[in-house]
Image (cartoon, rainbow, N blue to C red):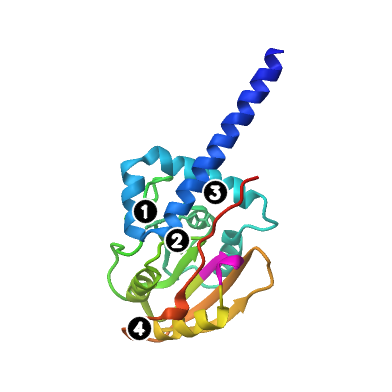
Amino acid sequence: RSGRSAALRARMEERLLGARFRYLNQQLYTGSSRDAARLFRADPAAFHLYHQGFERQVRRWPERPVQRIVRYLRRRPASLVVADFGCGDCTLAASVRNQVHCFDVVPLSPRVTVCDMAEVPLAAESVDVAVFCLALMGTNLQEILGEANRVLKLGGTLMVAEVASRFEDICAFLKAMTQLGFRTISKDLSSSYFYLLEFAKTGPGRPGPAPGLRLRPCLYKRR
Ligand code: SAH
């Protein structure tokens, strides 16, 4: 009997966590990166809850996108300097020999530099590889990718792993990336979970709106 009420209670707690996760997630995808940074700074508990929810979602996937980025980096020289925008628990930094600058809004690991990804404390043209692994969350995408462009060396690599269903029009997206100063090197659209895109920095972006850059918010269903 007490076993049954404990099970019921656990189920209710699970539901509540799920609801809070979806609410936070929605806020992250519908506000600017600055709002996200502010939200989590004000409420670090919300951040931890978000991360638990994120983990639960991604564990269901056949492959974690960050593992693809790890494999990619291992094939390239370890001397390349990497910037991981929205690094989460720093799995990437922990899995490669490269120097990795880890940026997130709240530190899940001591490696993290706390900041808004639209404004990272790195000098211009100082990194070889910039990574956004499931991290293109704010509505100010152009500003965020502009920041990656600023810190990347000319010819440097931008890696984007993002939820497949967020792309409304991948061609329009890639075209917009050209305007932001990124040439497409490779695209792997084979997974129904996430797309993996590799770009090279061709120069600074051209100013002006890039309407094709839009991504749908990633809203999880209630389960
Ligand atoms: N790249 C990691 C984590 C992805 S979850 C992985 O693949 O496992 C998305 C991460 O982006 C979260 O850790 C979240 O806190 C971070 N994030 C969201 N908005 C941000 C912002 N404005 N600035 C920096 N990090 C942000």
Q: Please give the residue where the numbered disc 1 appears in the rendered image.
A: 36
Q: Amino acid at mark 3?
A: Phe
Label 1 residue near ligand 1, CB within 8 Å? yes
Label 3 residue near ligand 1, CB within 8 Å? yes
Asked which quadrant contains residue 167, the reply is bottom right
Q: Earlier in the sequence, mark 2 or mark 1?
A: 1
Q: For mark 2, give the secondary structure.
A: loop
Q: Residue at x 54, y 35 (%)?
A: 16
Above or below, 78 against 205 in this view is above
Q: Is residue 102 left or right of residue 215?
A: left
Q: For mark 3, give the secondary structure.
A: helix
Q: Earlier in the sequence, mark 4 or mark 1?
A: 1
Query: Measured from the top left, where is residue 64 in percent x and y?
Result: 62, 57
Q: For mark 1, give the secondary structure.
A: helix
Mark drawn on residue 54:
3
Q: Is residue 163 magenta?
A: yes
Q: Residue at x 43, y 79 (%)?
A: 211
Q: Quadrant of ligand 1?
A: bottom left
Frontmost of labels 4 and 1 is 1
Q: Which residues are magenta?
A: 160-167
Q: Earlier in the sequence, mark 3 or mark 4?
A: 3
Q: Please give the residue where the numbered disc 4 appears in the rendered image.
A: 205
